[in-house]
Amino acid sequence: MFLLMAKKLIARLFFPVPFLLLVLAAGLALVLWPKLGTRCRKAGNALLVTGVLLLLIGSLAGQLLLHTLTGVYPPLKPEELPEENYTIVVAGHGFHAESGVPPERWFDDEMQLRLHEAARIGRVLGERKIPYRIVASITGKHDAPGRKREALNAFLGHYGIPPERIAFLENALNSRQEVQAFTKEPGRKILVSEAYHMPRLMMLSDRYELNALPAPATRVSGNAGGILKIVPSAENLSDCERAVYEYLGMLEYLIF
């Protein structure tokens, strides 16, 4: 657990905003430190210029960088799947059981999007009389299993998914552990996550022989169009951060 948290902490230092802040801070220190020579001040100026340029690029081209991931796999068409026994496995994201909030809203926005895609596929398979199950990985180690099942049944129940077709996985701490656990599920696996997360998951699917069908959950971009595309935005910077995180994860899988 300690190693996992340490890895996540180190990885965050390489996210665009923390990394660029470190670059800018280092450049500012070299420029302003009175006892350093001309060479160090030149290096500081170079770091400041580099940091500002990279920040500008990230706030302009983040959506394009993220699209290199979201465009890899097309949406799954469940109406075209052959008749098999399927298990729809859903990669986990945020979950918190909060009193006064309906159980189906205990999932964060990203997890709701993934569950929506899983339910869409399951409903079509059910209409075609093809056997299926939905198994979702649910984080939230401080929440009781009964609360997780309650939330999952409530959310998927709105789509007509019966409780007997619903199960959850709660002990996976990262994507690697999720995929390893999904391999133990029966039938042909359909792997659901957000579109930008799918390339990294499919790397793990191939490594651990999950042999899954990718089912990316897509969302409409909220970025403005027209002339506003050339204006730096926090949305682009957020997309850049997501893309960097995914590419760092894939780099880790190539090494380890």
Image (tube, rainbow, N blue to C red):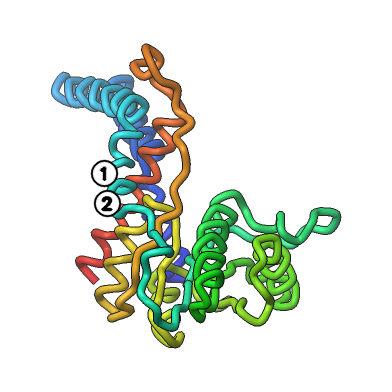
Amino acid type, label 2? Val
Residue extending farthest left:
39
Residue denoted by label 1 = 68
Which of these two is toward me, 246 or 10? 246
Name the disc covering residue 72, or none. 2
Residue type indicated by callout 1: Thr
Q: x, y (%) of residue 228?
A: 40, 15
Quadrant in the picture for residue 67: top left
Q: Quadrant of residue 251?
A: bottom left
Residue at the location (39% across, 52% down)? 195
Position in image of residue 224 (x %, y %): 45, 22
Residue 180 shows in this picture: no
SS at circle 2: loop
Asked if the residue at tag 1 contacts the one at tag 2, i.e. Cβ–Cβ closer than 8 Å, the answer is: yes
Classify mark 2: residues with Cα within 10 Å, few (<14), some (14-19) or many (20+): few
Q: Please name the residue shown 29% across and 80% down the image.
A: 208
**Residue 45 placement, left or right of 11:** left
Q: Residue furthest top?
A: 227
Measuring 44% from the left and 63% from the top, which residue is drawn there?
Answer: 192
In this picture, residue 254 sits left or right of residue 106: left
How far is disc 2 from disc 1 in space, using C-alphas?
7 Å
